[in-house]
Amino acid sequence: MKRLACFIACLPLAAAADWDAPQQPFPLYGGSYYVGPHGVSSVLITSHAGHILIDSGTPKSPQQIAAHIRALGFRVEDIKAILVSHEHYDHSGGVAALQRLSGATVMTSPHAGQVLESGKPDPGDPQYGGLPDMEPVARVKAVADGELVTVGPLRVKALYTPGHTRGGMSWTWIAVENGKALNMVYADSMNAVSAGGFRYSGSAAYPAAKADVERSIARVAALPCDILVTAHPEASRLFERQARGKAALVDPAACRSYAEAGRARLAQTLAQEARQR
């Protein structure tokens, strides 16, 4: 309990409080749906040949996610791949349970995959020391940077975006509705958040952390990006946009704005570390 309390204290309090708060599922665009709880995102990408799910929330999230999928008229058992953004409790804690429900293969980066398979936090994680263990996950497949995950007609591209963790990934795909194609982006956390004395300005456990998060921020900023979903939905004002109507979900500047927020957070973290020297 002490480790979990420390972990929660190291994250934005509003997000932690709302991780598993109720949230109605809703369509994003062209067969893609938001199916997560209120505070941590999960997206279902559907096809007649099977579905892809991105992220699983906390260990408390799978029941709500599965209920959302069924309420939308889809079968959890038709999920063929579960994609993971990064290897933290709030985004990966429900992977094992959703894998059991669906029989899907879990897919993520090599670093994240090692954490998921072991259930133990990565010693190089900027938040190491405040991270709880997770239920180990079976059948984890490592995907390469730029690799396409395919299920029937679905094509989802894997993009390595480390920095928040060593195994961070973002995912992109094209959704089509009424003949119009839009670029969809599921962006990983870009926050330079640390715990236990970790320093983005220099840490032996993860010396590339600052360079990694800078590259990841630049990569997300440059993406073709019509509809953005972030690992924590409030980071992209997802519900605020959805409340204004489906058309308001489209914002070609969203990825650039999200990247700017990441740059600002990194600058804040580095300034704080400089003051503590």
Image (tube, grey):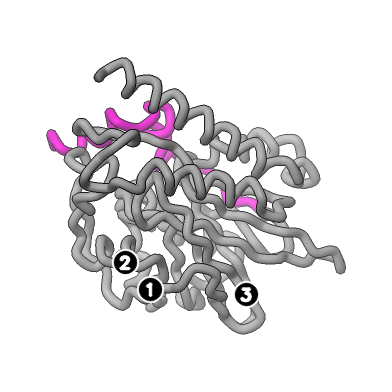
Identified by mark 2, the residue type is: Gly
Which quadrant of the structure image shows residue 176?
A: bottom right
Q: Earlier in the sequence, mark 1 or mark 2?
A: 2
Tell me residue 131's x, y (percent): 22, 43
Which numbered disc, 3 or 1, marks the residue closer to the eye? 1
Label pair 1/2, CB-CB below 8 angstroms: yes
Q: Earlier in the sequence, mark 3 or mark 1?
A: 1
Q: Which mark is residue 142?
A: 1
Q: Nearer the viewer, residue 112 or 266?
A: 266
Label 3 vs label 1: CA separation? 17 Å
Vertical placement of residue 16 versus 30, above or below: above
Q: Which residues are magenta?
A: 1-26
On the image, numbered disc 3 is attached to which residue?
155
As helix, strand or loop, the secondary structure at mark 2 comes to helix
Tell me residue 196's x, y (percent): 19, 33
On the image, numbered disc 2 is attached to which residue?
113
Tell me residue 164's x, y (percent): 39, 44
Identify the residue at horizontal 27%, vertical 74% (top origin): 138
